[in-house]
Image (cartoon, rainbow, N blue to C red):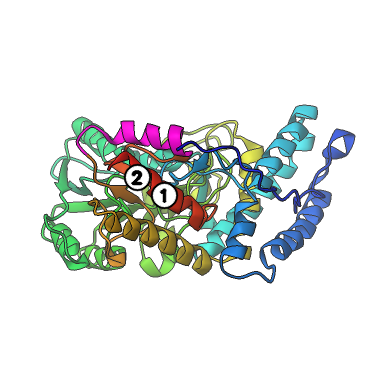
Amino acid sequence: MSVERSNNKISRRHFLGSTLKTGGALMLGAAALSSRLAIAQDAVSSQFSQNLSGEDYWQMVREQFSFPENTVPMNAANLCPSFRTVAEQVTQLTADIDQDCSFNNRGKFAVLLEDARALVAAQLNVSADEVALVRNTSEANNIVNSGLDLTVGDEVIIWDENHPTNHVAWDVRAARYGFSVIKVATPANLQNPEQLLQAFVSQFTDKTRVLAVTHVSNVSGIKLPLAELVQAAKTRGIFVHVDGAQTWGAMELDLKALDVDSFTASAHKWFMGPKETGLLYVKSDNIARIWPGVVASGWGNGPETRLVGARKFESLGQRDDAALAALGVAARIHNSIGAVRIEQRIVRLSQYLKQGVVDLGLPLVTPMDESLSFGVVIVQVPAGQGGTLSNRLYDEFGIAGAGTGGLRLCPGIYNTVSHVDRALAGIKELMA
């Protein structure tokens, strides 16, 4: 079966259309731009607060993305499309800089950066001074990895399903500094979160200095019992670092309540924000103990930084100011939809997909149990066939997944039930 380009009408109501205009009017001062952003916020809220329910609401959300119906993204674990409005903001602000790259004109981007930081921090229930906006999860993970003082005799415990930047990166650092990396495997015949919890806790010793885990695995879809794991580690004085690449933007998160020491994520995944923009949260008590990986212009003239709080991890040289500013637009859209609503939608689509796979009589790598899984869904396939099947699903059915861990499909809020049904029809035909 092949998929033809859909004639579905994509909404062209761009709720930030009045924010910036082309031509000479592009170069706005900070005050004028802030005023227009406030007006744009009202437009964003209005768009996503329409009196719609059920699939009608989510069809409206789908129309805020530019992808056509013959190339449907369903691999949020790797990369999501940006909201159309976010992409437009990046384009318009980039044009602003290209028209006038003076310090005078670019000064307003400091205001927009702080606006984005405050919005993101509030969503995570932490202070703005605890949030650094960096390039992606990989950079953020390595800031923590390279910034903690560790030496011979210390132990770092990781999950063997961590992303390489929270896995191999620890091995590389251990080879240089002599500490030990203990890798915890997922228990066989996993039945409940308690098994996962005990697998980690059983490895805690008086030498354990760091527990570094990934909230949801991108290779199995398994979700760790994070709150219980953090609590168990903190009673032993263990620093807890969490890679939240598969949950930020998809799950309601309260980092203050979770009491993690550091947390990382990328805006280009489930947050559906600008590319090359990421999150590093460091609990205020820990900011001083983590050394920065890069020291660039803006740091100051000595070992002590003049940057406040976690901003010291943003001393990275020239940044993509337009992308950082557009992160605030994505944050406003998330606020308008609502974190709980987003999480419920992700769970519904992933559970619907998993049940469909089971109904086809096919095995899953990802647990069906919601207490053990979230938005990442992986279908078990013959060894070495994940990439081939993923490519065929894209070429023949217009569904873009991945061959990671099997056949990986991760529906986002831009996906509809009909998209999942098409994916299931493709799986049925390809794996019959």
**Residue at mark 2:** 427
Which residue is situated farthest in the right direction here? 24
Q: Position of residue 58 (x, y in %)?
A: 58, 60
Crowdedness of circle 2 by 10 Å Cα count: few (<14), some, many (20+)?
many
Was residue 396 drawn as part of the magenta stretch in this picture? yes
Q: Is residue 30 above or below residue 382?
A: below
What is the quadrant of residue 325 in the picture?
Answer: top right
Q: How far apart are the two marked residues, 2 and 1, measured between alpha carbons? A: 33 Å
389 or 298: which is nearer to us?
389
Q: Residue at x 26, y 40 (%)?
A: 167
What is the quadrant of residue 331 in the picture?
Answer: bottom right
Tell me the kind of residue under disc 1.
Thr
Q: Which mark is residue 36?
A: none
Q: Is residue 27 above or below residue 372?
A: above
Q: Which mark is residue 264?
A: 1
Q: Position of residue 33 (x, y in %)?
A: 79, 49
Q: Position of residue 416 (x, y in %)?
A: 52, 55
Crowdedness of circle 1 by 10 Å Cα count: few (<14), some, many (20+)?
many
Q: Position of residue 214 (x, y in %)?
A: 31, 51
Q: Which residues are magenta?
A: 382-398
Q: Is residue 62 left or right of residue 181?
A: right
Q: Residue at x 49, y 50 (%)?
A: 419
**Quadrant location, the C terminus:** top left
396 or 142: which is nearer to us?
396
Please identify, in this view, whether the residue under mark 2 or under mark 1 is nearer the observer. Answer: 2
**Mark 1 element type:** strand
Q: Is residue 170 left or right of residue 110?
A: left
